[in-house]
Amino acid sequence: MMNFQTILKQLTTAVLSGLLIITVWLGAIPSAQAAATGTPVVPTTQNSKRIKAIASCLPKQLTIHNKDVGNRVARAFSEMNNDQLQRIFDVTDTPKLSDAEVEFKTCLQQKGFTPQAQL
């Protein structure tokens, strides 16, 4: 019985060591590639302007720290009824937009940004 426990402990150690090595490797490779290609890590001014526009255009109902779980769940279910599967699989050309999506799209266009994807 002692032999089986020793083998199991060694196997567990090997698996955990392998997971640690893979995790470190997956984190190191992209950063090394970015450094080698000279891709800037700091966002450009255009990107930071776009991010600021997105942050300022988020509908208020989505940015309020609402602790009412029932209201959040009801909103999630109402959004799920909004042709989400057809929109995901691009079945319909003119999906029905929620009020929050229309408000967001209009605000971005007023700030000079056109969404890349059709909302």
Image: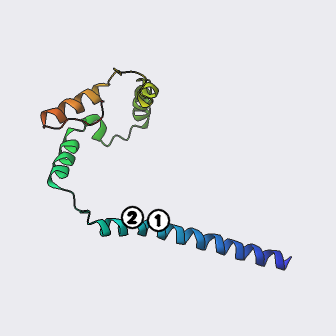
Does residue 93 appear left or right of residue 48 in this picture? Answer: right
**Callout 1 amino acid:** Leu
Which residue lies at the image location 59% right of the left edge and 71% below the top edge?
18
Q: Residue furthest front?
A: 37
The residue carrying mark 1 is 26
Foreground pick, 14 / 73: 14
Which residue lies at the image location 32% right of the left edge and 65% below the top edge?
34
Q: Which mark is residue 57?
A: none
Kindly check if marks 2 and 1 are in contact, taking CB atoms under 8 A apart as contact.
yes
Q: Quadrant of the N terminus?
A: bottom right
Q: Secondary structure at mark 2?
A: helix
- Percent from the top left, x then y, of residue 12? 68, 71
Which residue lies at the image location 42% right of the left edge and 67% below the top edge?
29
Q: Residues within 10 Å of mark 2 (few under 14, many from 20)?
A: few
- Percent from the top left, x then y, of residue 81? 44, 23
Foreground pick, 67 / 119: 119
Q: Quadrant of the C terminus?
A: top left
Q: Which mark is residue 30?
A: 2
Q: Secondary structure at mark 1?
A: helix
The quarter holding residue 107 reads top left
Q: Residue furthest right?
A: 1
